[in-house]
Amino acid sequence: MNPAVVNVIRNLESTTMKRIAALLAKELLLETRQQYSFYGLLLYIGTTLFVLFMAIDQPDAAIWNGLFWVNLLFICINAVAKSFLQESRGRMLYFYTLSTATEFLLAKLLFNALLMIMMSGISLLLFTFLLGNPLQQAAPFVGLVLLGGISLSLVFSFLAAIAAKAQQNAAIMALLGFPVIIPQLVLLMRLSSATFSPLLSVTWPAVGLLVALDALIVLMAVILFPFLWKD
Amino acid sequence: MKKSWWKILSAVLLVYTVVAGLLGPVPTLPLLQETIRNLYFHVCMWFAMMILFTVSVVYAIKYLRSLDLRHDIYARNFAVTAMVMGLLGYATGTIWASYTWADPNKPLINSFSTIARDPKLIGAAISLLVYGAYLILRDAIPDIDKRARISAVYNIFAYAILFPAIWILPRILPSLHPGNDGNPALDVKNDISASMRIVFYPAVIGWTLLGVWITTLKIRMQLLTDKKLIA
């Protein structure tokens, strides 16, 4: 290819990257400025787990696993819901002049994935602390939790965008998202149940499938978001 | 007359399905016995459902490309008919399962929890839930153009995420349902005997065409109601 063309493409790429980085930085800055939502989430995890702690003290592995994933699902809805709902119409118009739809979306997805990785880690810690630790193979489970957190955040971020455009609250997001997420959640639960036994091992092709599904979600979101973004 | 050849074909094929399906030769298999004839009805419902959902998504894509409200009406009505087909698939499946899967020594209701956990039933339930959510999302948005756009986006997103998952899930989870190794529905070539295939293929086409026929009637009514909006 012509070196000049390559240069132009590289420039374009760098500006796209820069814009995504700037949008991500803006999200992080907002999060540190408006800490109520972050602490709100922490409190949400804490109280949920405390209620579970009161209800059952040492659940056996299958129940622990089920509770953990359901808990993660609800945390995700709360964590991700505000990402698009917080943007007012005027602010969206402003972003429209600054960046493309894809850049805006990718920044949101990245931020939500980071947030969910953090929240999954925290809830895993609290789970082992309050409800006991039935895990026999910790490392694969932690890996699955991070992967699951990312999957959940990706799906619900896009649905949050839909809910925001429909001028609805987080309830419709949950309604839209639950059926879509069930297959992935079932897969994650199945895979992670292997880590509660010292003999079973996690089936890697299934992990590959989950990663492929994540890639598909990002792809679909990138393709479809421009239609949501234009008003 | 020229245009309605497929309606006649549908009626002829369905008459053939019912007559040949109830009278034709079938292999005598243990457990299945004469219930095997349900294949011409139960399996065809799911085929028709999948095909009609796919048509609905195609119209959703067409809507996003053209922004022609007519395509939105098409997408919605195909989804509704597909849901009806899915419910009929459940009804026929319930009858079938009650003679083959259920424990004959216990009341039917006791077998429910084991049967309902089957991955194929979960997959079917999820797809009905997704399109239920699709209809609710539509009703939640008052503005017509916005409703069409957002619901088209959800339709495409949900379909793209859901259907790969439904095709993958049964390969990983254990199941009683036929077609376990690899194929999520049924291995038509190897699972169905030649004498049944000559009824099964026409039955699939006949039921699908009937679904399309019902949908076109609904679409025509809707187009007349919304005449002023579309013109």
Image (cartoon, coloured by chain):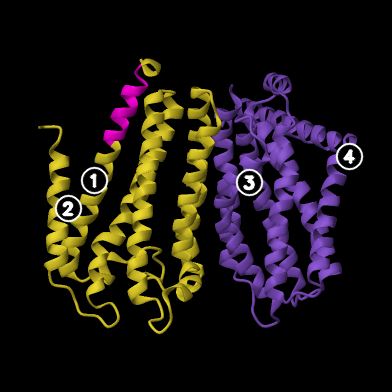
Q: Which residue is mark 4?
A: A35
Q: Is residue B87 above or below residue B116?
A: above
Residue drawn 77% across and 71% down?
Answer: A138
Where is residue B193, by image quadrant? bottom left
**Chain of the residue where label 1 is placed in the rendered structure:** B
| Number of marks in the rendered image | 4
What amino acid is found at the position of numbered circle 3 in the picture? Ala
Per the model, the C-alpha gap separating discs 4 and 3 is 24 Å
Q: Is residue A217 above or below residue B187?
A: above
* B220 in magenta: yes
Q: What element does badge 4 sit on? A: helix
Per the model, the C-alpha gap separating discs 4 and 2 is 64 Å
What amino acid is found at the position of numbered circle 1 in the picture? Leu
**Chain of the residue where label 4 is placed in the rendered structure:** A
Residue B19 left/right relative to A51: left
Residue A206 left/right relative to A131: left
* Residue A169 vs residue B53, the one in the foreground: A169
Per the model, the C-alpha gap separating discs 3 and 2 is 41 Å
Chain B: drawing colour: yellow
Q: Position of residue A52 (x, y in %)?
A: 79, 64
Q: Which residue is mark 3?
A: A174
| Chain letter matching colour purple | A
User: The C terminus of chain A lies in which quarter of the figure?
Assistant: top right
Tell me the number on the disc at residue B210: 1
**Chain of the residue where label 3 is placed in the rendered structure:** A
Q: Which residues are magenta?
A: B216-227
Tell me the number on the disc at residue B14: 2
Q: What element does badge 3 sit on? A: helix
What amino acid is found at the position of numbered circle 2 in the picture? Leu
N-term mark: 1 or 2: 2
Per the model, the C-alpha gap separating discs 3 and 1 is 34 Å
